[in-house]
Amino acid sequence: MIRIGEVAERTGLTPRTIRYYEEIGLLPGPPERRKGEHRAYDDDDVERLSELTRLRDLLNLSLEELKQLVEAEEARAAIRKQFRESDSDAERLQLLDLALPHVETQIGLVRRRMEELKRLEAELVEKRKSILARKRELAS
């Protein structure tokens, strides 16, 4: 088991951020512990926090969007488990139908970020054109 200070070092997050992620449900809460005892984390918690940080930074997600992404992934994981355990093609078809909206949520979040990046790229391309045009003017 790992204490919060070491988790913070491993993930680059502050202890306060880790506690807040627990509070809002991004990190599963600790199992029951006696009052005054410290929360102990494990390698799965460190991995989850690292992945949350990677997604947050990569996609520039708000915490609410990050929570949507995580909830969709958790729902898909539960559906995958049911799918593997089922022998019924009819049930498997229903499970696949249940999984689709969760994937659509995730795709939507990624696409919004891609559109923002495309807009930024277009702005920068225009700025580069403007700089090159001014440079040609000054050189002639």
Image (cartoon, grey):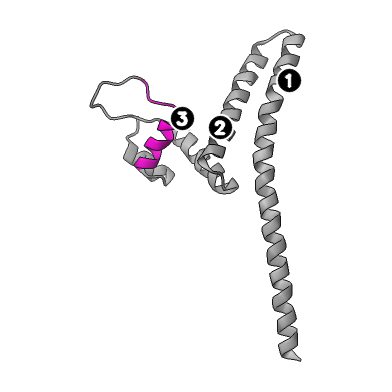
Extent of the magenta region: 15-31
Q: Which residue is mark 1?
A: 97
Numbered label attached to residue 70:
2
Mark 1 vs 2, N-terminal side? 2
Q: CA distance from mark 3 to mark 1?
A: 26 Å
Taking the spot 41% from the left edge, 32% from the top edge, the residue there is 22
Mark 3 vs 2, N-terminal side? 3
Q: Residue furthest left?
A: 36
Mark 1 Cα within 10 Å, few/some/many (few <14, many 20+)? few
Decide: is 80 above or below 6: above
Q: Which residue is mark 3?
A: 25
* Residue 50 in magenta stretch: no
Taking the spot 70% from the left edge, 72% from the top edge, the residue there is 128
Q: Where residue 8 sits: x, y (%)?
A: 37, 42
Left or right of 107 in this view: 21: left
Query: Please, what is the three-letter code of the amino acid marked with disc 1?
Result: Asp
Taking the spot 71% from the left edge, 89% from the top edge, the residue there is 138
Query: Please, what is the three-letter code of the amino acid marked with disc 3?
Result: Gly
Marks 3 and 2 in Cβ contact (< 8 Å): no
Q: Residue furthest top?
A: 88
Mark 3 vs 1, N-terminal side? 3
Marks 3 and 1 in Cβ contact (< 8 Å): no
In front of the other: 27 or 123: 123
Query: Please, what is the three-letter code of the amino acid marked with disc 2?
Result: Val
Decide: is 65 above or below 135: above
Q: CA distance from mark 3 to mark 2?
A: 10 Å
